[in-house]
Image (tube, rainbow, N blue to C red):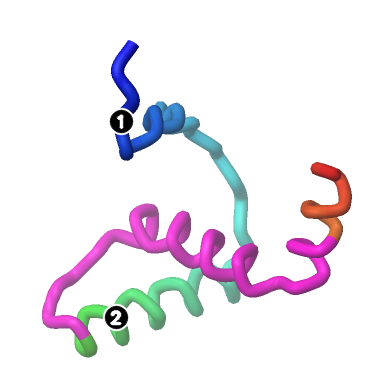
Amino acid sequence: MPELKLAKLPDRTPIKLAIAVTPDLHQMLQQYAALYAEAYGREEAITDLVPAMLTAFLEGDRGFLKARKAAED
């Protein structure tokens, strides 16, 4: 097998989740989507923004990252 610089790509099969949110959270998500469209000149559905928001939140949570790293060791 040849040695390639690019590693094998991870599984990218999307997993669909269904969640219920409060009316207040839904309103905030709508407001965020409107600000996003204003900032970038492109409308995106809330369902497309939420995964990116969750990723950013988890990648910025030092406690979570520390615990995750400790679990891997």
Rendered position, 13 above or below 42: above
Residue pointed to by mark 2: 36
Q: Nearer the viewer, residue 20 or 56?
A: 56
Q: Secondary structure at mark 1?
A: loop
* Outermost residue to the top: 1
Rendered position, 10 above or below 25: above
Q: Is residue 10 left or right of residue 69?
A: left
- Asked which quadrant contains residue 44, the reply is bottom left
Magenta stretch, main secondary structure, is helix
Give the magenta range.
40-66
| Image mark for residue 61 | none
Q: Nearer the viewer, residue 55 or 23?
A: 55
In the image, is residue 60 part of the stretch drawn in magenta? yes
Residue at image location 39% in from the left, 34% down from the top: 7
**Label whose residue precedes the other's in the sequence (2 or 1):** 1
| Image mark for residue 4 | 1
